[in-house]
C-alpha cells in the first residue's frame, strides 16, 4: 500500500497557507446535489464531562432541535471519551428505547446498554449494563468506531481505532464475535489523519471519510478480511478546521455530514454524494444554528438495521 503520509505530501504543503476557519471552508461543488438532502437528518448524541448522554436532531435545513441532557450520570465525571455510534431499538408497545454502544472510561473500554424511558432522558431502573472489554485505551487512540451491519444479509461487527503512534499513524481493526474480539490487525501510514467518520458498510469492507491536518479529505476503504486499505483523494484542502465528523445515511447512496469545529463551537453541514474520488459531489448546506460544547465527545444514534451506503 502507498503510505498515506506520502500520498498526502503535496496536499499538505499546498494547504499550509490556507486559513483553517471552516466557515470559509466549504469545498467546491458542481450544480448537482444529493437528491434527498433537504429531507435528511441525523440524531446527534454526546457524552458530557459530567458523564451524561445528550441528544438532539440536526436537519439538513440546517436546523437543530433543543439539546436534551440525559440520561444523567451514566459514567463517572471526567472519565468518558471515545464513544462509538449508539444503536437504538424502539419498542412501540411500551415506549422504551434500547441503546447500545461502546465508550472508554479512563483507559478501559466498556460496552454500555440500557433502556431509555418515554422521555428519552432517563434510564429504566435496573436496565443499565456496563461490560468491560479491556484496557490499554490511552490518549494515543484518537478515534474509535463500531461498525455493526448486515449488508446483503451478512451480519458482522468490526471495531476500528485511529492510533497516533510516535513514528506512524495506525488504523487498527478487530472482528467482534460471540466469543470476544479477534483477528486484531493494524495498517500503517495514517499519521496525517486528523479525524474520521464511517460512511459506507459493505459485506466485506467499511469505508471512512478522513480529514488530514493539512486540510485534505480522503476516503479510506478498509477490508474486513484480508487485504489492505484503499485510500482515495476527494478534496485537497479546506477541511482542517474540524475536530469531529459525524455522518448519517442520506437517500439511497448519499451522506449527511456534520463537521464540528471545537475551537469555535460551530458545526457545518454538507450533503455528500456517493463517494467517487475527486468527482464526489459535496454541497455545503451551511452553519448549524446551535453551539457544540468543546468538552463533549460526540457520536451518532442510529436505528438498528441501518446500513451506511455512502461509499
Image: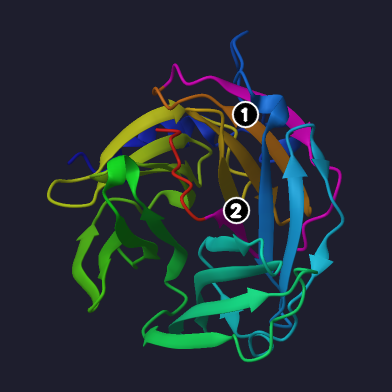
Where residue 31 appears, x then y in whole percent? 63, 8
Please give the residue where the numbered disc 2 appears in the rendered image. 244
- Residue at figure coordinates x 39%, y 29% from the top left: 233
Q: Is 139 drawn above or below residue 40 in the view shown?
A: below
Q: Is 8 drawn above or below residue 302 in the view shown?
A: above
- Quadrant in which the N terminus appears: top left
Looking at the image, residue 102 sits to the left or right of residue 38; the answer is left
Q: Secondary structure at mark 1?
A: strand
Q: Is residue 68 found inside the magenta-colored segment of the image?
A: no
Pick the residue in front: 136 or 53: 53
Mark 2 crowd level (few <14, some 14–19, many ≥20, 10 Å Cα) = many
- Residue at figure coordinates x 56%, y 44% from the top left: 247
Where residue 191 appears, x then y in whole percent? 36, 54
Please give the residue where the numbered disc 1 appears in the rendered image. 271
Where residue 104 appears, x then y in whole percent? 50, 79
Mark 1 crowd level (few <14, some 14–19, many ≥20, 10 Å Cα) = many
Looking at the image, residue 137 sits to the left or right of residue 42; the answer is left
Looking at the image, residue 170 sits to the left or right of residue 115; the answer is left
- Quadrant in which the C terminus appears: top left
Say which mark, if any, is on residue 258. Answer: none
Residue extent of the magenta highlight? 278-303
Q: Is 18 drawn above or below residue 52 in the view shown?
A: above
- Residue at figure coordinates x 42%, y 36% from the top left: 218
Pick the residue in front: 257 or 203: 203
Pick the residue in front: 31 or 68: 68
Give the spatial CA distance, label 2 vs label 1. Answer: 16 Å
Amino acid at each position: 500500500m502507498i503510505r498515506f503520509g506520502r500520498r498526502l505530501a503535496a496536499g499538505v504543503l499546498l494547504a499550509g497557507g490556507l486559513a483553517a476557519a471552516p466557515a470559509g471552508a466549504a469545498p467546491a461543488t458542481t450544480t448537482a446535489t444529493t437528491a434527498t438532502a433537504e429531507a435528511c437528518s441525523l440524531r446527534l448524541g454526546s457524552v458530557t464531562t459530567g458523564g451524561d448522554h445528550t441528544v438532539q436532531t440536526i436537519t439538513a435545513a440546517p436546523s437543530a432541535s433543543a439539546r436534551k441532557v440525559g440520561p444523567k450520570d451514566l459514567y463517572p465525571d471526567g472519565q468518558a471519551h471515545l464513544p462509538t455510534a449508539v444503536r437504538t431499538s424502539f419498542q412501540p408497545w411500551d415506549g422504551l428505547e434500547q441503546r447500545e454502544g461502546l465508550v472508554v472510561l479512563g483507559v478501559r473500554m466498556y460496552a454500555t446498554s440500557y433502556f431509555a424511558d418515554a422521555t428519552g432522558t432517563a434510564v429504566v431502573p435496573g436496565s443499565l449494563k456496563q461490560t468491560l472489554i479491556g484496557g490499554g485505551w490511552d490518549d494515543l487512540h484518537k478515534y474509535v468506531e463500531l461498525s455493526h451491519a448486515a449488508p446483503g444479509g451478512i451480519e458482522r461487527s468490526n471495531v476500528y481505532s485511529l492510533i497516533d503512534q510516535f513514528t506512524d499513524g495506525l488504523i487498527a481493526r478487530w472482528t467482534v464475535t460471540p466469543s470476544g474480539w479477534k483477528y486484531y490487525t493494524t495498517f500503517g501510514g495514517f499519521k496525517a489523519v486528523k479525524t474520521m467518520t464511517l460512511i459506507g458498510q459493505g459485506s466485506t469492507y467499511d469505508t471512512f471519510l478522513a480529514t488530514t491536518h493539512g486540510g485534505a479529505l480522503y476516503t479510506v476503504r478498509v477490508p474486513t478480511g484480508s487485504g489492505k486499505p484503499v485510500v482515495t483523494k476527494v478534496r485537497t484542502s479546506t477541511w482542517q478546521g474540524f475536530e469531529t465528523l459525524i455522518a448519517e445515511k442520506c437517500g439511497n447512496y448519499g451522506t449527511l455530514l456534520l463537521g464540528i469545529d471545537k475551537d469555535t463551537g460551530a458545526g457545518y453541514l454538507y450533503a455528500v454524494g456517493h463517494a467517487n474520488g475527486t468527482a464526489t459531489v459535496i454541497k455545503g448546506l451551511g452553519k448549524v444554528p446551535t453551539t457544540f460544547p468543546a468538552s463533549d465527545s460526540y457520536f451518532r444514534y442510529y436505528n438498528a438495521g441501518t446500513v451506511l451506503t455512502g461509499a
